[in-house]
Amino acid sequence: MATADVYNIEGGKVSEIELADEIFNVDVKPHVLHQVVVMQLANRRAGTAATKTRAAVSGGGRKPYRQKGTGRARAGSRTSPIWRGGGVAFGPSPRNYTYKVPKKVRRQALKMALSAKLQENDLIVVDRLDLEMIKTKRFIEIMTALKAREALIVTDRQLRNLELSSRNVPNVKVLRSEGVNVYDILRFKKLILLEPSVKQIEGRLLS
């Protein structure tokens, strides 16, 4: 069974924790991770881009001038895309970009992302991250002690002081264990897990 050191907020080792091999020691397949990340990013797209076609713009209804004798090119409507104020040809219209990858693939990709962080020594387990007050300076000091200035922090419950202290710090995100996902794990250099959140993640992925 894989193990990881547990650190305190001063960066000192206090104990060790055993990690389930079925989650933190699986073969990492980049194409599976890529498939799930692309799905997540596609599902975040709003799909609200829209333009008016020649049928949607105001105007038209009558021929702007007679067919022959003017010396100009023939025209049937003022809503033509080649006219100023006309409709847009082949413009975007609202659409839904969402699609789903099989649940088993999503679960396996999450295990691979966690395993990759452990294999690359980018996984840090912390015994606690409770802050006495909302203090960004104190939060930065803790991140410096842990040598993790760019990190995803996964908590086991709502830690209001931690969340508010970190929200103005770039390249840091605080996430609760139920929301942990492949994209966020891979997006940040370090993954910081609170010790209780490890058991929550294992319970979710082993069930």
Image (cartoon, rainbow, N blue to C red):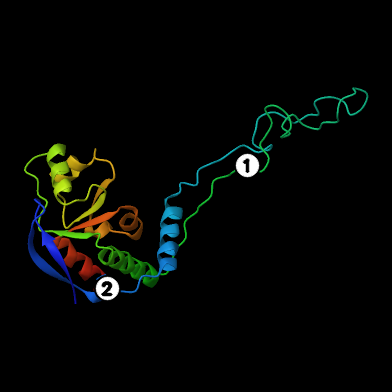
Does 150 sit above or below residue 60? below
Q: Position of residue 135 (x, y in %)?
A: 12, 38
Does 12 sit above or below residue 85? below
The answer to which image quadrant residue 207 occupies is: bottom left
For discs 2 and 1, the disc positioned in front in the rendered view: 2
- The residue that mark 1 highlights is 91
The answer to which image quadrant residue 3 occupies is: bottom left
> How many discs mark residues in the rendered view?
2
Query: Is 102 placed left or right of 165 in the picture?
Result: right
Residue ID at (36%, 67%): 109
How many C-alpha atoms fall within 10 Å of the one at disc 2: few (<14), some, or many (≥20)? some
- The residue that mark 2 highlights is 25
Residue ID at (19%, 45%): 163
Q: Position of residue 124 (x, y in %)?
A: 19, 59
Query: Is 93 placed left or right of 30 in the picture?
Result: right
Q: Position of residue 82 (x, y in %)?
A: 74, 32
Q: Secondary structure at mark 1?
A: loop
Q: Amino acid at mark 1?
A: Gly
Q: Amino acid at mark 2?
A: Asn
Residue ID at (47%, 56%): 98
